[in-house]
Image (cartoon, helix red, strand yellow):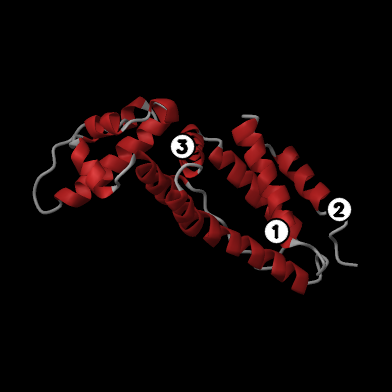
């Protein structure tokens, strides 16, 4: 987010107060993730930028992690396209993986992920919420794509879809979060080609 797009502290009044406050808080949180990073992200900074009291944020979200979860889910998480079978499944996955990898490489998105990973491992409720609202809906779309590819005779019916997803998306997460390297077309093409070696329908 550029300096000119930096959210400024705003005063809220009238019947739209709640909506305006909510939007201002999300704007401030998204900005803070991109500039301060997870290590320096705080409710105090978000409240100051949004022009609200800390109690307002805690009343709606309860914790820093819950606020970040909403920002990530509703603003930062890349979309997952449905597969219609009009192109080879490998081509579809290469496109999806490239877009996904480049999207989560953005600073605010990457910092939100780091925050959620850190908090999920000590908060089972947050982990379940993340699985339900973020992970499961997108996995369902990917599994449906692989099932359609089997139906179309593109990949073997013996293929383990969970392993395929772990290899492909796990490779992207590792590249971005662990190695902090850019996801390129060459990388995603090679990743898909290697994973799909031996998966093609006979």
CA gap, disc 1 and disc 2: 16 Å
Which numbered dot is residue 115? 3
Earlier sequence position, callout 1 versus callout 2: 1
36 displayed left or right of 152: left
Name the residue located 27 percent from the left edge and 46 percent from the top edge: 23
Query: Mark 2: few, some, or many residues within 10 Å (few <14, many ≥20)?
Result: few
98 displayed left or right of 107: right
Number of numbered tags placed on the structure image: 3
Q: Are circles 2 and 3 on residues that touch, CB within 8 Å?
A: no
65, 70: nearer the viewer:
65
In which image quadrant can residue 158 be found? bottom right
Q: Answer whether residue 170 is visible to the viewer in this image.
A: yes
Q: Are circles 1 and 2 on residues that touch, CB within 8 Å?
A: no
165, 95: nearer the viewer:
165
CA gap, disc 1 and disc 3: 25 Å
110 displayed left or right of 93: left
CA gap, disc 2 and disc 3: 35 Å
Earlier sequence position, callout 1 versus callout 3: 3
Which numbered dot is residue 162? 1
Name the residue located 48 percent from the left edge and 59 percent from the top edge: 132
Q: Spot the residue most to the bottom.
A: 151
Query: Mark 3: few, some, or many residues within 10 Å (few <14, many ≥20)?
Result: many
Which numbered dot is residue 197? 2
Q: What element carries label 2?
A: loop
Give the number of the mark in front: 1 or 2. 1
Q: Is mark 3 on a helix, strand or loop?
A: helix
């Amino acid at each position: 987010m550029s300096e000119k797009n930096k959210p400024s502290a705003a005063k809220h009044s009238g019947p739209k107060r709640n909506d305006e406050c909510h939007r201002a808080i999300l704007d401030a949180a998204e900005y803070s993730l991109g500039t301060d990073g997870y290590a320096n992200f705080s409710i105090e900074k978000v409240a100051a930028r949004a022009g609200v009291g800390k109690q307002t944020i805690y009343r709606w979200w309860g914790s820093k992690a819950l606020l970040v979860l909403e920002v990530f889910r509703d603003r930062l998480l890349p979309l997952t396209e449905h597969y219609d079978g009009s192109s080879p499944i490998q081509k579809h996955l290469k496109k999806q993986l490239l877009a996904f990898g480049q999207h989560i490489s953005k600073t605010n998105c990457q910092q939100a992920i780091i925050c959620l990973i850190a908090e999920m491992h000590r908060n089972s409720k947050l982990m379940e919420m993340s699985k339900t609202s973020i992970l499961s809906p997108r996995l369902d779309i990917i599994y449906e794509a692989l099932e359609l590819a089997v139906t179309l005779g593109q990949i073997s019916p013996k293929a383990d879809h969970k392993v395929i997803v772990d290899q492909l998306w796990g490779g992207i997460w590792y590249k971005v979060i662990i190695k902090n390297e850019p996801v390129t077309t060459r990388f995603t093409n090679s990743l898909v080609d290697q994973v799909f070696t031996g998966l093609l329908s006979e």
